[in-house]
Image: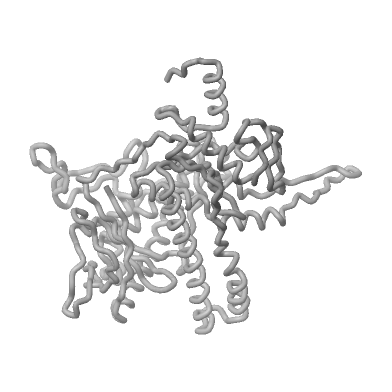
Amino acid sequence: MQLTYKYRLKPTKAQLITIATHLELCRRQYNYRMGERFRWWESTRTPINACPLIVSIVPIEEIYQNIPLTRVQTRDGRKKDESGNFLTRKGDVFSNIEGGYVQWQTIQVADLKNTKKLFPDYKLLDFQVLQDVVNRVETSFSNFTTPDKNGNRRSKPKFKGFHYYKSFTYPQLNNIDPIEDEQNRICIKLAKIGQEPMVFHRPIPTGFKVKTGTVIREGDGWYISLTLEDQTVPVTVAEIQPTEENSLGIDLGITNYVYMSNGERIENPRVLRKSAQKLARLQAKISQKFKGSKSWQIIKGKISKLHQFVARARLDFQFKTAHYLFGKCEVLVVEDLSVKNLTRRAKVKTEVEDGNLVYLPNGQAAKSGLNKSMLDAAHGQFATVLKYVAWKLGKSVLFVDPKGTSQHCWNCQGKVPKDLSDRWHYCQCGESLDRDENSAKLIKKIGLSYESGGGSTSLKKAFEKKEKEACGLTVIR
């Protein structure tokens, strides 16, 4: 099992300069290695049947002239076989080309030695920290060039400016536990930096060991995120069959952040909306300052701290809400919302008048405000919090397909079409209640039709199960 604990650092003035220098060197190395990858990619990605006008003008010999075809192991490897022998030994020769493709990550890691020779400043950095920078480049670039299981690729990676590269990682902090220094301060020892004082606000669980550490720059100071691991603790996810007594359905919204199937509701804190006026004032002030000046930096720090406050207040609210919800049930049934689809731009409306294409009003201004409120609510992050809290408490969270949950009656399952502005649910069966409460009750009813091993449940599956039970048929799994 792995856990992640985050602690605040209290560096001295000298350590503060050292940490900032390390971060800046990592940022420069990231941009340089990313530029290398772009040059190689642009020079070699042209297909063989392409038009000669778009073929790379760089000869193949020049592209690969400084790239070795093989590499030599400089020391014995760490992994061993069942007999206790090293899988790789010093002097072993490996190819830098695999399946006809150059292993750019391996070549860039091997070139870090030349970087330290040419630029002595990089001798201040731990070698594994530099290796992690190359690993970050590989991750960003592979996400761009390699499609996922759905055939989608991420956008082209960007070079990192000063304000956009905020952390560096020690990949191996094996068994390094916080210790007390001469001044009775809790410290953690970091390579090339020394013993770093920290706010040790919660102890490391018994049996867990520190594996990696990431030093992070935030608006109000420096933090370290420690990855803890205990291989003897299994990762188990509770799977509880929902029943009428142990389950609770909730509907996520904007006016009411959570509407429960028992009639209770939790209002939306609207953290960003409440801070928008103060944020607008600060942004108006910083626009009148000369960029990089002392006054500009002061206002920039205030803006960063305000954004940090918004993020922390939202996350704190979500954790408290999650614990409150699981205090009322064993199984929480939630709609599986796609925030990406819900926050898309409004579709363009056009018509032809006198042979000319005319764009009609499509309500994009109102949709922009709705999108901002939905992103402020952060329902996607709340779903992640629910999963974590459910695992932590040994309870279960069940996600159902949201399709049709606001357009059907929870009592008779009849379709009751409603626009977004219709906030009350009326049905021919006699049900009359808030549309969010109706959705919450229907979501719970869909969750009750869930059976282990049957995949995700939906309104359609709930209808099918009800029809089969009404006909006296036995559902065979």
Residue extending furthest right? 354
Q: Who is closer to the viewer here, 345 or 458?
A: 458
Q: Residue at x 66, y 58 (%)?
A: 369
Residue 328 can be seen, yes or no: yes
Q: Residue at x 55, y 19 (%)?
A: 470
Q: How is the image coloured?
A: one colour
* Number of marks in the rendered image: 0
Residue 459's x, y, as percent? 56, 32
Residue 90's x, y, as percent? 14, 48
Quadrant of the drawing holding the C terminus: top left
Lateral position of residue 177 relative to residue 319, left or right? left
Residue 191's x, y, as percent? 23, 67
Q: Residue at x 71, y 55 (%)?
A: 366
Which of the 4 image quadrants contains residue 18? bottom left
Residue 141 can be seen, yes or no: no
Q: Who is closer to the viewer here, 347 or 246?
A: 246
Lateral position of residue 334 relative to residue 99, left or right? right
Residue extending furthest bottom? 294
Q: Who is closer to the viewer here, 397 or 285?
A: 397
Q: Is residue 455 above or below residue 200?
A: above
Residue extending furthest front? 430
Q: Who is closer to the viewer here, 415 or 143?
A: 415
Q: Is residue 185 above or below residue 265?
A: below
Residue 384's x, y, as percent? 44, 49
Q: Residue at x 45, y 40 (%)?
A: 247
Q: Is residue 15 above or below residue 225?
A: below
Lateral position of residue 263 relative to residue 358, left or right? left
